Image (spheres, rainbow, N blue to C red):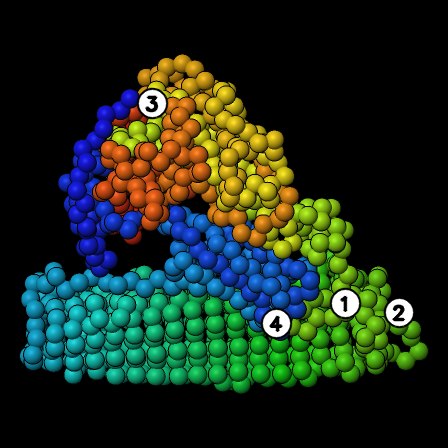
Amino acid sequence: MKKHGILLSLVMIVISLFSGCRKDHEQIQKKAEKTSELQVPTDFKWKTTLDVSLRVSLPMNGFFPLTSKLSIYQGNPFSGGLLIVSGSVSKENSFDQIVRIPAYLNSLFLYLETTAGTQQIVEVPVLGNQLSYTFESSEVKQLFKSLNAVQEIGPECDDCDQVISGSGNYNIGNGQTYCVQDNFTGTITFQTWNGGGTLKICGTATINQNISLGTNSWIIVTQGGSLDINGIQMWGSNNGVKVYANSSIQISGGLSTTGTFVNHGTMTIGGFATFQLLSTPFINTGELSVGSGVNLNNAVLLNSGTFSAAGVIKLNNGSSITNDGTITAGDQSELNGSSMMNNGSFIINNSRFNINGGSTFTNNGDMGVTAGSFNVNFSGSVVNNGSISAASQIKFNSGSNVANNCMMTCGDLAEFNSGNIVFQNGYFRSDDRIQINSGANTILKNGSMMSSPKFFIYTNISGQGSSNSIKATSDFTISSQTVSGPIELSTNNLIILPGTPASQHFINGATVVAIGEEQNFTAVTACNPEGLGSITVTDMDGDGVPDELDAFPNDPDRAFRSWYPNENNFSTIAFEDLWPGMGDFDFNDMVVIMQYEIVTNAENELVDLNGKFRLMAAGASLNNGFAVAIDIAPDNVASVNGGVIAGSLINFDAKGFESGHTNQTVWIVMDAINDLYPGPDFLNTVPELAYVETDTITVSMILSTPQANYGIAPFNPFIFVNQERGKEIHLLDFPPTALVDPVYFGMWEDNSVPQVGKYYKTDSNLPWAIEIPVSFDYPIEKVDILQTHLKFAGWATSGGTLFTDWYLNLSGYRNQGNVYVKP
């Protein structure tokens, strides 16, 4: 048995969430040597998880036939993300569910699969306990979208060699830092011959001159500061300009860079901007506006903010742009021996976009020329996984290499002149005509579609994979050429070489049908807003969920699987078992890992619940049992099977759950751990003792009436102590079952007040149990958790706002010598 700790009075800690708060909690953590000494907020629930009320909807104007499948992942499902929840969603019925996730998660991935075979995935930030999202219409590009952008706050003005204010003329040298903390108007000279230095602006500065920013010279605008300057002439090395979040710089003239250039705030450049000779990538996460044009010369731009230029944007030899935000050019844009990857929005408001000289353009987002053309020239390459549109023409010239995997559209002529043009489940439309000339090798693959009023074909077209479609609402003109492979042409006016049958031009499976008589089905999707034909859906069990989306295609009562904490991992509940007395807070008196499989029907109602449990540690001599209370009335349960019973303490209903409960169904997972694993005390908590390999115990519950409301896993797990059924220990503020003995409430260190829903806490708001959403690395015997997991104290004293990932194996987070490790 463990000794009781000393009960301490509660002192409320007011936590600052601004800079320095983690340092404060590090100091608190160092002062508290035991968990019993911690002073935590009175409303702290000791939760390592966050309950997020999730509502996901489909737009009414999209093509979403029947029921679609929504899956919620922790991490990108295409990069090893873990499935948490799946269920049905339709235009008529949103997906509404509370999802319990680790509190440290910043985002969830929503993965939509439709009856039409289309998929959408979006990363949505978790910004509280409410998350609402509506998938965009299928007419809008939405393959992948990240809603996160990281803006650095920047340093404070607290490391200054000299603070300047008012007006004056200053020389900065010897590597010193001059700070503007309030207001300054004047001139600045950087003495590059004398070591240079830094001008750091946290206030408001006006410099009515062109600054020469040479070697070892820096301008930093931070902490809400602003700088208005005539111009900056950059040269040399180890120099640069950095503007941080909520700060701004306005340069009246133009700019030519060297060294480092970073913008997390608001930047305005009045003249022409040339980004070149940079030692690191040019980073923009804020708002950057250029009053004229922009040249990138052998420079790298990483943009996740807003970047606009009134004139031309040119990328010259060796330059590259990765855009996760918005880029807008007022005039044309050119890639010359350079590369660009667009994951966000790239808009050209006039003239054209030329991809020249072996340049490459990869588009995963939205690219549009609102009043001009899109041209691929001189062996340029395009990979389009998003949306490309041009108000005027699209032309592929001079050995172009084009891979269209999503959507390309134009308002005028589309002309394929030369190169390899490959459609992979891609869509291409011209509102005027498509002309494919003799130098173009055009291949349609796997459900691709081309559409236009008129087609003029002067070379062969081939199809591969699954059926492809060409739709000509006016004329389709072909001379001696062929359309070969799995391609269906639909048109009411086929114009071919006189005297030749259609079968001579449409070969190897290619066919011609009239408009409206298409045999192919091409769904309306994020990449194809037009679609073609009709779809046949197979639903063998008739539950409204198509077979390809149904985890139980032959069972009308079951459709989806969800998991807690996820499909691959277990969560942990760890107990101190001396309640109502205080223990030693090593949280290893009883440690159980658990995973739930949640089976629901087409209406997202619970049908089956399956739990896996494993006893990992029992650092005490008490013969405890472990159970789970679930807020489902026993009348709605058909059966409960599983659990390991060694004694005769428990009374069971014939259906397999514990009898004596009216509004809850109680699973008895294991009733007597010392009988199940006889031997010395301290099972798997003392490294010197032999490790005991415990069994995984499965409990399965089948409902007689499906339930829309059934609580949140892991529900209400608890232990009953030393074969005394009424002596239950639950998580803090979780209610006991009907079989609890109330005599223990308020005894010794327990400060429960059942009348107000206050349970299992000391008067210092310390718990007897905690749940961790991973397989927990618990402390060795008699070592306080505070001395093992070094961020535990900071988490607790902050009320759970800091170090929400305290239990992970991160640098500086634990004393590994105090963690129990299987010998």
Look at mark 4 in the image and give the residue it sits on: 60
- The residue shown at (35%, 33%) is 575
- The residue shown at (81%, 76%) is 515
Task: Give the SS element for disc 2.
Answer: helix
Mark 3 vs mark 4: in front? 3
First-in-chain label (3 vs 2): 2
Disc 1 versus disc 4: distance between alpha carbons?
19 Å
Look at mark 2 in the image and give the residue it sits on: 504
Disc 3 vs disc 2: Cβ atoms closer than 8 Å?
no
The answer to whether 505 appears left or right of 447 in the picture is right
The answer to whether 455 appears left or right of 804 in the picture is right
Mark 3 vs mark 2: in front? 3
Q: Amino acid at mark 4?
A: Met
First-in-chain label (1 vs 3): 1
Q: Quadrant of the C terminus?
A: top left
Look at mark 3 in the image and give the residue it sits on: 620
Mark 1 vs mark 4: in front? 4
Q: Is residue 603 above or below residue 599?
A: below
First-in-chain label (3 vs 4): 4
Q: Amino acid at mark 3?
A: Ala
Disc 1 vs disc 4: Cβ atoms closer than 8 Å?
no
- The residue shown at (57%, 77%) is 389
Disc 1 versus disc 3: distance between alpha carbons?
66 Å
Q: Amino acid at mark 1?
A: Ser
Disc 3 versus disc 4: distance between alpha carbons?
59 Å
Residue positioned most to the top: 679
Q: Is residue 92 above or below residue 437?
A: above
**Closest to the observer: 671 or 528?**
671
Look at mark 1 in the image and give the residue it sits on: 534
